[in-house]
Image: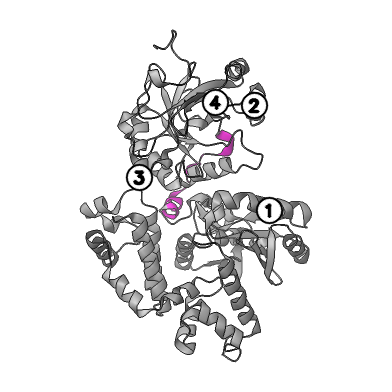
Amino acid sequence: MPSNAEAAEIFRNIADLLDVLGEKFKPDAYRRASRSIETLTEDLGPIAARDELGTIPGVGDAIAEKIREYLRTGRIAYYDRLQKEVPPGLVEILRLPGLGPKTARRFWVELGIEGPAELADAVAAGRLDRVKGFGPRKIALIRDALRAAAAAPPGGARMPIETAYPVAERIAGALRARSRSDRVEIAGSFRRRRETVGDLDVLVTSDEPEAVFDTFSRLPEVKEVRLRGSTKETCILANGLQVDLRVVEPAAFGAALVYFTGSKDHNVHLRTIARDRGLKVNEYGVFRGEERIAGSTEADVYAALELAYIAPELRENRGEIEAAARGPLPALVDAAEIVGDLHVHLPPSAGPSDVDRIVGEARRRRLTYVGVVIGGPGADGTPWSLPPATVARLIAADDPALRVRRAIEIGPSATPRRLPADGAEFAIGRPTAGSDPADLAAPDGVPVRLIAHVAGAADERAPRGWIERAHALGAAVEVGPGAERLDSTWARHARESGTRLSVATGLGGPPDDPTFPIALGFARRAGALRPDVDNAGGGSTPVVRRPSGRRRS
């Protein structure tokens, strides 16, 4: 069955093949279309049926016709033809770190090399030693790239941001604490809070670059130093992730942060604006002729281009630059505005001390309310509930400064008779594979305040139905990392459809749990403002009380 993800992959592959064939402009066009398609929150079929494919950024007439062909047949003849023209191993070479399309094409045209294995043999045999443009350093980089690719995990180098986050923060923390670094920032897709990251770009300012590099390369996370120059060091981590550490002069730090944060399409648009104003913008600053007129801060860089500041999470060239040209952008939801969490889990065997730990952490974070799940359906469908003493401790912990509320998880088929615990003040909807959102209803006087675990449903199109159901019930949907929360793409769909978001806080997790900063980043990436986020005060009052009287048995 045709899907957006498969279509995006096909266009990405077309771009790679065109690169190898030496095309100059077409690859970028197909990559832009691919990125736009993979972030759509609506299937391509209905868009094509409305004859609106041309409204997708980067999709012109030629690509729109290929999308229609794909929807009709499941294939694209142009892609099939390109695959016959290019040996498949050349695309693998193209994806090796540090090797671009021109180099891959030279291997093919000049040396008859058609894949990584043949390239490795050529390097070992010294066939590159006397080829123009391949000096000892370049050959060493190729050898390292081949070795890294062989050791990389299946599926490519990109990894979920929740996997990369803890190690990235440890690296930044160590550089701040142990080296002579004045500023340390992690840029790239990590800073934009994309769901996956391909590598890490770390920017620092320091008067002693060698001391910074020494600190970095000695970290336990670093497996191999790939390259060290006067201002840049490249290392490979134990988990296979590449990290590029750059020491930047303070006067250019803001420009470097804009440049290395990206995205590529955002930066291309900025360069176009600069050119139209008789300026030049790059990682060193904004220049009028040879004079640098901005560069020390990101705000200065945007101001020099007559743009308002744009938050990193929005820098995807989806209209944010046009909006910034009109004036200041609305303030995205901020960490300080998150005032509670309605979806906190304790183990089924949790005791009163576990309650004290959760409550203590909530107070430390200055939250004003917390909802703890006291029961629900287990993994095998068997109902469970917290021990009575634990529930009693929750009730006792409630006070005006921190409202402690009791929640119950329900599935679409839940009825009051099947609720596994009494005393719940509100319900959290939990979709199950193949379930119908219309079957989820508030049980006997217990309002549904949140629908969580949405992306855990089996059908990849299911989030849309659950978002609509949340809107109908006046509930929020949970956003955050992992397989069972909405990502930034679906969060944007929810926000645009008028459904409130709830940012997962990771309350009760380990000290380095990255759930909250990533979830907040996803919400910001979706363009969420404070009123869009339920636990930032965007929804109704969090104090939920059940009506008097007992639930019917």
Question: Mark 4 or 3 closer to N-term?
Answer: 4
Mark drawn on residue 354: 2
Give the CA separation, mark 3 to mark 1. 38 Å
Give the CA separation, mark 1 to mark 2. 32 Å
Residue 312's x, y, as percent? Answer: 53, 52
Regarding mark 2 in the picture, which secondary structure is present there? helix
**Please, what is the three-letter code of the amino acid marked with disc 3?**
Asp
Give the CA separation, mark 3 to mark 2. 35 Å
Q: Which residue is located at x 45 percent, y 76 percent?
A: 89
Mark drawn on residue 459: 3
Asked whether the beta carbons under mark 1 and mark 4 sit within 8 Å of each other, the answer is no
Residue 519, relative to residue 173: is it above or below?
Answer: above
**Please, what is the three-letter code of the amino acid marked with disc 4?**
Val
Residue 126 relative to residue 449: left or right: right
Assign the N terminus to one quadrant of the image: bottom left
Observer-nearest of 183 and 474: 474
Residue 328, relative to residue 84: is it above or below?
Answer: above
Question: Mark 3 or 1 closer to N-term?
Answer: 1
Provide the residue span drawn in magenta: 320-337
Residue 28's x, y, as percent? Answer: 41, 69
Q: Which residue is mark 4?
A: 372
Question: Mark 1 or 4 closer to N-term?
Answer: 1
Q: State yes or no: residue 325 in magenta.
A: yes
Question: Mark 1 or 2 closer to N-term?
Answer: 1
Mark drawn on residue 172: 1
Residue 399 relative to residue 15: left or right: right
Q: Which residue is located at x 24 percent, y 55 percent?
A: 48
Regarding mark 4 in the picture, which secondary structure is present there? strand
Mark drawn on residue 128: none
